[in-house]
């Protein structure tokens, strides 16, 4: 029987997943949990830390880094033959800044002080891990989905606008990690009738090209979702297909490659009963992945966790009926689900 990574490898792609840090003995999506480590080993060629490379994890204060957890993850990945992506050098959203950065006083020369903090952060990480990390989500979620405008933060206010901050991040990353693929990562609000988010991402990508900002790929997060009650999820995906393709066609026409960085399936619109719910999730995923994989520009495909047991969706988007979200390829008992078969078939 094929595994996810073998299925992807047939077409020269890599499959992978997010994983977490936890001490041995803890029931978590960690390499220290043998049951979860076995899933990673079976299905993944690539790993990405779910939270441990973010500023909130690495930067307890302006003058300190804490690498202990992320180091342990990178070491385990390297010892076990995985490749690693880095997520994320700059999450351009004040909600996800460490508290100290939102209130930082940049002093008399704010532009250079703020740029210094950003550069130092990116430089330190890129040089510490070198070729162990082959691809970075340099910038995450810089576009406000409600307006399509770029989000402002303490750094953007100090540095004369968000465009300056983002360019700075990509240029610093290119200089510090010239071997690495540099990705702009976002979620595009696929299923939303409101197109503003996608329009905003397209204009950001156009601006990057116009200014010569070194960006190689668009990361399509792919937290895809079934929100409306539906009895045929495949049909729903195909109704959305023309709009998705219009967007993706414009992205690849600008010369960007594509990466699926955080795939999982939100199942709020599906019934609680397991069998029809798993069928709907699998059908929707299959239709979505078929569209994405029809682009030769698409490289790696990463899931945001392998098991429903540890999925962020349980907390982020609880179902109104209280049932556990079933958006990952393995269930809460770490047993494979129809979604895994659908992913293998699509890959
Ligand atoms: C999420 C993690 O899964 C959660 O554990 C954490 O509390 C918040 O962040 N888009 C991203 C990811 O780019 O970093 C987010 O990860 C999920 C949405």
Image (cartoon, grey):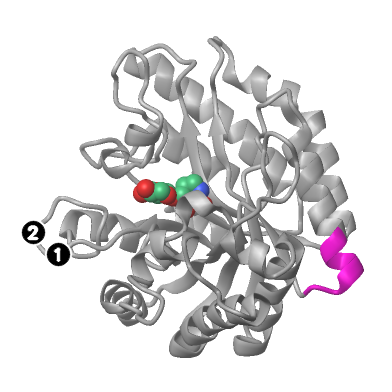
Q: Position of residue 284 (x, y in %)?
A: 57, 28
List the residue tagged with mark 1. Answer: 23
Choose top left, top right, bottom left or bottom right for residue 212. bottom right
Task: Examine the rendered structure and indicate whether residue 100 appears above or below residue 334.
Answer: below
Q: Position of residue 346 (x, y in %)?
A: 59, 42
Task: Examine the rendered structure and indicate whether residue 247 appears above or below residue 287.
Answer: below
Instruction: Report the magenta stretch's main SS.
Output: helix
Q: Is residue 287 left or right of residue 41?
A: right
Confirm whether the magenta stretch covers residue 153. Answer: no
Task: Confirm or deny contact between disc 1 and disc 2 (CB under 8 A).
Answer: yes
State the residue at coordinates (55%, 41%).
345
For mark 2, does the 10 Å Cα neighbourhood hold few (<14), some (14 to 19), or many (20 or more) residues?
Answer: few
Which disc number belongs to residue 25?
2
Q: Nearer the viewer, residue 216 or 97?
A: 97
State the residue at coordinates (58%, 61%).
154
Magenta highlight range: 207-213
Query: Which residue reaches farthest left?
Result: 25
């Amino acid at each position: 029987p094929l595994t996810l990574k073998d299925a992807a490898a047939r077409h020269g792609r890599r499959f992978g997943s997010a994983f977490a840090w936890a001490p041995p003995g803890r029931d978590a999506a960690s390499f220290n949990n043998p049951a979860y480590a076995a899933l990673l080993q079976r299905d993944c060629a690539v790993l990405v830390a779910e939270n441990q490379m973010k500023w909130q994890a690495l930067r307890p204060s302006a003058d300190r880094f804490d690498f202990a957890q992320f180091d342990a993850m990178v070491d385990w990945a390297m010892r076990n033959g995985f490749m690693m992506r880095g997520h994320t050098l700059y999450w351009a959203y004040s909600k996800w800044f460490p508290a100290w950065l939102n209130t930082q006083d940049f002093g008399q020369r704010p532009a250079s002080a703020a740029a210094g903090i950003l550069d130092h952060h990116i430089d330190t990480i890129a040089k510490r891990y070198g070729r162990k990390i082959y691809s970075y989500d340099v910038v995450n979620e810089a576009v406000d989905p409600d307006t399509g405008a770029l989000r402002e933060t303490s750094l953007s206010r100090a540095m004369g606008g968000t465009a300056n901050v983002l360019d700075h991040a990509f240029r610093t990353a290119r200089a510090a990690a010239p071997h690495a693929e540099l990705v702009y990562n976002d979620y595009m609000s696929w299923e939303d009738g409101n197109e503003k988010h996608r329009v905003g991402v397209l204009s950001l990508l156009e601006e990057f090209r116009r200014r010569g900002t070194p960006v190689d790929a668009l990361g399509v997060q792919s937290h895809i979702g079934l929100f409306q009650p539906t009895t045929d999820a495949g049909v729903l995906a195909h109704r959305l297909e023309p709009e998705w393709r219009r967007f993706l066609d414009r992205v690849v026409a600008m010369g960007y490659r594509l990466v699926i960085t955080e795939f999982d399936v939100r199942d709020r619109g599906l019934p609680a009963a397991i069998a029809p719910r798993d069928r709907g999730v699998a059908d929707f995923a299959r239709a979505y992945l078929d569209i994405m994989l029809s682009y030769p520009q698409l490289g790696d495909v990463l899931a945001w966790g392998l098991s429903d047991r540890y999925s962020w969706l349980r907390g982020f988007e609880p179902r109104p009926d209280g049932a556990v979200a079933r958006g990952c390829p393995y269930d809460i008992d770490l047993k494979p689900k129809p979604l895994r078969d659908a992913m293998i078939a699509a890959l």
